[in-house]
Amino acid sequence: MIRFTPPHLPVRRALALATLATLATLAGLAQAAKKPRPPTGSWDAASATATASYNLQPLATDDTVNPMRGYHLWQNQALVPVPNGMQDSFRRYYWSELETSPGVYNFALILGDIQKAREAGRKFAFRLRNMAGYEDENRLYTPAYMVGNPLCLSGCGFWLDHDPANPEKTFIPDWNDPHVIARSRELLKALKAELDRNGVTNSIAWIDVGMLGQYGEWAMKSSVYTSAPAAITPVTLANKREYAKMHFEVFPAQQHVMFVPYSNEDALTYGLLEQTITAKPVGLRVDCLSRDGYFRQWSDRPSHWVPFENQWKKAPFIAEFCPFQTLDPLNNPATARVQAATYHISTIGNGNFQLHKPDAERWGDLTPQEQEDLRMLGREAGYRYGVERTVVGVSNGVLNFSATVRNDGNAPTYEPWSVRVELVNSAGALSWTGLLGGFNLNALSGAGASQMAQASFTLPALAAGSYKLRVIARDTRPSTTASPARPPLKWVNQGIAGDGFTVMTLVRR
């Protein structure tokens, strides 16, 4: 018979302690199974904590290209040399090009231009218009079926002989006629449906609110109506609002801009301050940058400009030139620079000066100072974001990261960007990304305004090797083949290349 005897007290205590330790270990393992396991191996940095400050490029040599700033392609023109290209393009279309008979639309022109823009890495902006200027060409910009249409109260408009010495005439639409307004709205609705059908609506950078006035720019000479039939009068304030409203209702998610003549004060009040249709604040549009005295319509009425003077902080101010000739002492690139700085203009159409000359001569015929003013205008307009300072700490597989970003431009960005921290492997492939929350680049209005954000990240268990740690700003909008997202924002730091700003190298062992 084998007899078991109880162990001595110290032995029993040891067994009890061992049992408790085992139970604790099992409990710990069970608890660990509920949490993500920490990465095996280790991450090393050049130092446990690294603080660095960086230089931004001088304005005088900064040719960084980003969306909705500097120059954009204007009517397929790029008269000012832009070494690194442009990320937006703009065109305008006549109603008669898009609708040939009631409800028969052909948007091949617009779709083709969007496709060209996409292939060049750009987004696209446009305006629709119902007439040109007063060229007396006997040419219709309103569809032919509208002229004398019995559904209109007074023939939908009238022919104007603007120049008695020239027998040709210009058709002036009746902007107040309900049928003209209704068909204008149907044109916008048909265009929106076609863009949606082709999946390219998100390729739109902005829409000029048009369809009204010469060139769709919301201006008409008052003298026009001295020759009009008695029933046709200048457009009413209520109908001006209606033309703006139809754009907003058909394209509620797009960025809109409205023309700024003082005569549009009521429509601007509606579009910028009162309407609640659009998802984005409506911006401003000027068609006569460089014309001396053009802004006096507002600067001479400062109290009237006050409601709109800070709209640039939340929506873009977009411009194109009025035609100017070389050696003009008043209407010139230097005047344009002052206007752009004063009113915080972000992007300018790259054309529409030195008219009546071949494109190849328009730039070369300018004086060296005029050329330099135009180059500087492109550098000064819009935002200039750079990484000013970073602090990096790596310990036990945890990355502590902070960055300070500064805007040295004259305006903010108006598109959505997320600032991220990323690891890129030795082959250049993105291996990991983390959101650096707390940044709002849209709130950095320029003039050196800065913002700092920080976050902690548990680094992933990647393969052993060296990884570049970078800070990058990415477009947050969905990307599709038909409507790709913007490329990453380019910082204006000195000595950087590529999409992201490399801060340091981390090593995974």
Image (spheres, grey):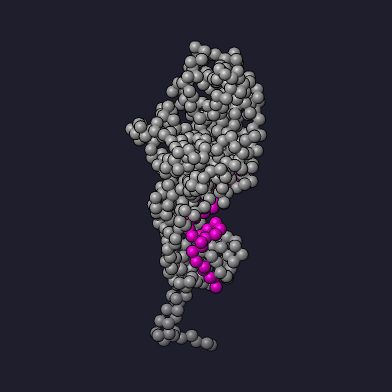
Residue drawn at the location 57% of the way across and 45% of the way down: 364
Dominant secondary structure, magenta: loop
Q: Nearer the viewer, residue 431 or 2?
A: 431
Q: Magenta segment: does it hold 486?
A: yes
| 125 left or right, relative to 443 | right
Image location of residue 363, percent across then percent down: 56, 44
Residue drawn at the location 56% of the way across and 30% of the way down: 128
Q: Residue furthest top?
A: 230
Residue drawn at the location 55% of the way across and 56% of the way down: 499
Image location of residue 330, percent across then percent down: 44, 37
Residue drawn at the location 46% of the way across and 86% of the way down: 5
Q: Quadrant of the C terminus?
A: bottom right
Q: Magenta segment: does it hold 427?
A: no
State the extent of the magenta-drawn residues as a range.
480-509
* Number of numbered discs overlaid on the protein picture: 0
Res. 10 in view: yes
| 417 left or right, relative to 300 | right
Q: Nearer the viewer, residue 283 or 342?
A: 342
Image location of residue 495, percent across then percent down: 51, 61
The vertical placement of 194 against 387, above or below, is above
Q: Nearer the viewer, residue 385 or 186?
A: 385
The vertical placement of 270 against 235, above or below, is below
| 24 left or right, relative to 119 | left
